[in-house]
Image (cartoon, rainbow, N blue to C red):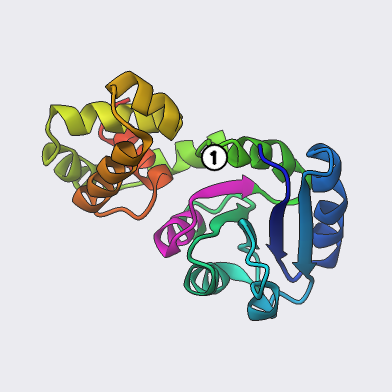
Amino acid sequence: MRNGIKIVVVSGHAPLVRGLEQRIPEATGGRAAVAGTDDGSDVAGLLREPVPDVVLVDLAPPAGVAAISASRSMAPQARVLAMADGDPAAVLDALRAGASGVLPRGEEAVPPLLAALEGWAVVPVPLLASLVDRPGPQLAHTAAAQLDDNDRRLLRLIATGSSTSEIAGLLHVSDRTVKRLTAALLRKMHVSSRTEAAAVAGSAGLV
């Protein structure tokens, strides 16, 4: 994890924001600075210069999925992570809106956040299981049927949590090539993130 990481918390719940503003710098040894809003509305103000590296969006009202879309639009280079209590439908909406991972709400978000800062895809196990078990296996199998052997190998590596650098080493290609191949795979599967691709892989029995 590099130094000087700026994290923005978008939530309408002041205790959650205050807790993360204290816990994240402590957990990162001061390498991450946190700014937050407790009314869930001033997304634009928080995303002004300096642009954040990570945006944590609380899916509970008044922030919600709209704040993910706004963050992706105003800070496209930032990594957007959702915080959710456990509603699979809300999680899918967040992933489709551009979130690259899902954390539990509150201070329990800190350990998986640290993993996300190291490049890991993060979704709480109960939520991932719910997503995999949701109706729609035909859609998952249809997406999987379009993949060739190379696509399936890449998908398995993504679904098991391998980082871009780890995948590059295993495939003997550059990190840039892995990013290009991953983007092509997501387009082929009609999903918006590595996390959603992993859920489809689980539903299709590829992992």
The residue at 78%/54% (across/down) is 33
Does the magenta run of residues contain 108? no
**Quarter of the figure with residue 79:** bottom right
Q: Is residue 52 visible?
A: yes
Label 1, residues with CA under 10 Å away: few <14, some 14-19, many ≥20: many
Please say if 45 is above or below 106.
Answer: below
Quadrant of res 153: top left
Q: The residue under label 1 is which amino acid type?
A: Val
- Viewer can see residue 162: no
Q: Position of residue 181 (x, y in %)?
A: 25, 41
Residue at 18 percent across and 29 percent down: it is 150
- Read off the magenta span: 91-103
Left or right position of 93 against 25? left
Residue 23 place in picture, x, y as percent: 84, 46
Q: Secondary structure at mark 1?
A: loop
Tell me residue 167's x, y (percent).
37, 27
Give the camera-side residue of 91 and 37: 37
Q: Is residue 8 left or right of residue 89?
A: right
In the figure, is residue 87 to the left or right of 113?
left
Position of 105 relative to 115 (above/below): below
Count the marks. 1
Which of the image's four quarters has the N terminus? top right
Residue 98 drawn in magenta: yes
Q: What is the quadrant of the C terminus in the image?
A: top left
* Foreground pick, 10 / 145: 10
Residue found at x 53% / y 38%: 119
Give the residue at mark 1. 122
Left or right of 52 in this view: 29: right
Q: Residue at x 50, y 61 (%)?
A: 77
